[in-house]
Image (cartoon, rainbow, N blue to C red):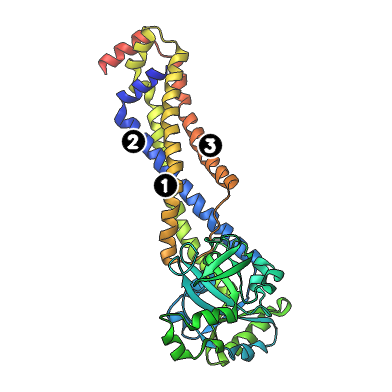
Amino acid sequence: MKQLIMHSLKMHKVQSASIAVSVALSVMILVTFGLVYGGVMQGVQKSEEQGGADVMAIPKDALQYIGDTELLYTGAPAAVYMPAEVVDKIGGAEGVVRVSPQFFGQTLNSGCCSTTGETRLIGIDTTTDFVVSGLAGADQVAALGDHGVIVGSAVGGVFNNTIKIYNEEYQVVGTMAETGTEFDSSIVADIDVVRSISRNMEGYEHYWEKHGDPSGLVSCVMLDLDDDNFDAALTSANAKINLSGVASPLVRSQIVDKSRAQLKSVFLLLLVAACLMAVVALLQLFARFFSSVWDRKSELALYRAIGASKADLRKLIAGEMGVLVGCGIVVGIILGFVAQTALLGVLRDGLSFPYVALGPAQSFALELAVVIVFVLVSALSIIWPLRQIGRLDPSTAMQQGDID
C-alpha cells in the first residue's frame, strides 16, 4: 500500500506538490504568528507583573536620540546625561514614594570584556534602588560594593561567578529575572563604579566636556508613586520634573498603552494574513480530495478490477491525504520556528516591546492546535470521497472514464 500511495502521488506530482507547499506555508505562518504573539503578550504581562518605576525622568534632549518605548524596553542604549541635582529637585514632589537615579555606561562587547554580544552597563544607587531589587533581590543589590555586579538573564561570559570588564574582574552577586527586554542583556553595578569606568572611557571625552565630570551626572531618575493617590501624585511629579529645567517625564502606563496599540495594529494585519493563507490551503486541500473519486474514477475502477477492495481504496485516499498534510505540517512547523526570528527582527526595527519566548509546553500546545485544525479539515475533506468509493462499480466507472 505504501508503494501504491507514493506512486499515486507521483502520478499527480504537480497537484500534490502544490497542496503540500500550501499546507507548509499556512502552518508556517500560523506557527510564526502564534510564537511571536504569545511571546510578546507574555513579555507585556511579565513587564506589568514586575512593576518598576511609574515615571522615568530623563534628560530633555534624550528623545532626540531615542524613542520613549526604547527607553522603557531597551535599557536606554544611548549616552544621555543631566546634573545629579535633579534628583533632589524632583524627589520632593507630593505623592512620590521612592526616587532612585541611574547612570548609563558604555555598551560592552567581547572586544573589551568577557561578555558575549552587546551588553549594556548600568549604574544604580544601591541605597535607593527599587527597580533592580525587584528583579534580583534587595540583598543582592546591597552586596554590590566596588567589585560586584548583577547580570541580566541573557548575559553570557560569566565564568566561576565572575565577569571581566576592561581587565578588571567583578563578582556576580545575582541574576535579574527575565524581563523580555534588552535589560536582560545588561550588567548592573554600583553607580560610582560605572561612573569611574566611564570617566576614562575612550571616545566619551566629549560627553564630559559638555556635561561635566561623571561623578555629578545621572542618566535618569526612577520614581515610584503613591498608588492610593496615583493621579494626583503623577500630576505633581510631572510638574516637578518639567520645572527642573533639565528633565522630561516618561510615564510608564502611557508608554505601555502606546506600545500595545501599535502592536495590536500590527498583529491584526498578521492575523488576517495568516487566516487567509490557512483558508486558501484548506480549501485547496478540501477540493483536492472532495473531487478525487470523480476525477480519478477510471484509475480507482482499474484498481478494483485487479483485486483491490473498497477498504484498500479508502486506505489509498486517506494515505495520500496523510502524506501530503503530514509533510506540509512537519515542514511548516520547522519553518515557523525559523521565521519567528526573522519576524521579530522586522518588528523590532520599527517597534520596541518586551518579548519572552514561549516555553516548550506552550510551544507544543500551539503546534498541537495547528495540527488538529489541519487534520480535522483534512479528515472532513475525504469523508465524501470515501463514501463514494463504496458505491463505485468498476465496469461502469471504467466506461465513463473512457467517455470522459
Q: Which mark is residue 372?
A: 3
Residue 246, placed above or below residue 80:
below
Residue 106 visible to the viewer: yes
Q: Which mark is residue 355?
A: none
Out of 147 and 194, give the one closest to the viewer.
Answer: 147
Q: CA distance from mark 3 to mark 2?
A: 21 Å
Q: Secondary structure at mark 1?
A: helix
The C terminus lies in quadrant: top left
Residue 241, placed above or below residue 364:
below
- Earlier residue among tags 3 and 2: 2
Q: Which mark is residue 276?
A: 1
- Earlier residue among tags 2 and 1: 2
Q: CA distance from mark 2 to mark 1?
A: 17 Å
Q: Mark 2 belongs to which amino acid?
A: Ser
The N terminus lies in quadrant: top left
Q: Identify residue for label 2.
A: 18
Give residue 126's position: percent from left, percent from top.
Answer: 66, 78
**Which residue, as the protein is rendered here, is positioned at the far right?**
228
Give residue 348's position: percent from left, percent from top.
Answer: 44, 63
Residue 278 visible to the viewer: no
For image coordinates 43% across by 82% down, the residue present is: 204
Q: Secondary structure at mark 2?
A: helix
Give residue 298's position: percent from left, percent from top.
Answer: 32, 15
Residue 224: image quadrant is bottom right
Out of 294 and 314, give the one closest to the viewer.
Answer: 314
Disc 2 or disc 1, which is closer to the eye? 2
For label 2, count other residues whose C-alpha is less than 10 Å away and answer few (under 14), some (14-19) or many (20+).
some
Q: Is residue 38 left or right of residue 2?
A: right
